[in-house]
Amino acid sequence: MAGKAASNMEGQMIRNPKNSEHYTWGANCDGWHLVRDGKLSVIYERMPPGTSETRHHHNQAQQFFFVLEGAAVLEVEGKEIKLGKHDGVHVLAGQAHQMFNRSESDLVFLVISQPPSHGDRVNAKK
C-alpha cells in the first residue's frame, strides 16, 4: 500500500519554471513544460516585446491560452482578440491561430493543450 501511495504522489509534485523542462522557440521566446503526458500538456511561456508565433493550427489538439502577465493579441481564424492579465481564450482543434506580443514588456502565459499539441502542429501556408 505504501508503494502505491508514493507513486500517486509523484503526480502531485509542485511544478514551476525552475524545475521544469525548458525550450526556446521563435525569436528568444521561452517555454517550460509544467505537465507533459500523453493526454495533457501545460506550458508556461514567455514572449519578449515585439515577438510573435508562426500562424498555425492543430488537427487534434484544442488549446486554452491564459495570460499571467502583460498583454497579448491572439489572432484566431482572422479575428484579433486582445488579452490582458487573467484573460483567456479557448482555441478549438482546426482553428488557425497566432500569438503576438505587441507591447513593450514581456508576455507570460499558459497554454494548455488536450491532447498535447506537439507533433500535431500544421504551419499556415505562406
Image (tube, rainbow, N blue to C red):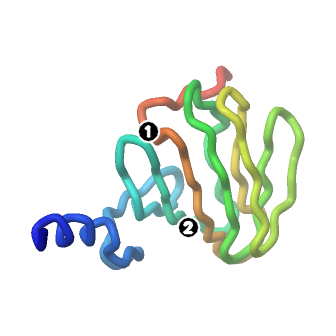
21 or 64, nearer to the observer: 64
- In the structure shown, which secondary structural element does the residue marked by tag 1 occupy? loop
Left or right side of 10 for 119: right
Say which mark, if any, is on residue 118: 1
Q: Amino acid at mark 2?
A: Arg
Left or right side of 109 for 33: left
Mark 1 Cα-neighbour bin, 10 Å: few <14, some 14–19, many ≥20: few
C-alpha gap between disc 1 and disc 2: 18 Å
Q: Are marks 1 and 2 in contact (CB under 8 Å)?
A: no
Establish if 2 lies above or below 64.
below
* Image depth: mark 1 or mark 2 in front: 1
Mark 2 Cα-neighbour bin, 10 Å: few <14, some 14–19, many ≥20: many
Query: Residue 76: where, in percent of width, then height?
Result: 79, 40
- In the structure shown, which secondary structural element does the residue marked by tag 2 occupy? strand
- Quarter of the image that includes the N terminus: bottom left
Q: Amino acid at mark 1?
A: His
Sooner in the amino-acid sequence: mark 1 or mark 2: 2
Q: Residue at x 67, y 68 (%)?
A: 49
Q: Quadrant of residue 6?
A: bottom left
Query: Residue 91: where, in percent of width, then height?
Result: 72, 42
Q: Residue at x 12, y 73 (%)?
A: 2
80 or 88, nearer to the observer: 88
| Residue behind mark 2 | 46
Establish if 92 lies above or below 37.
above
88 or 18, nearer to the observer: 88
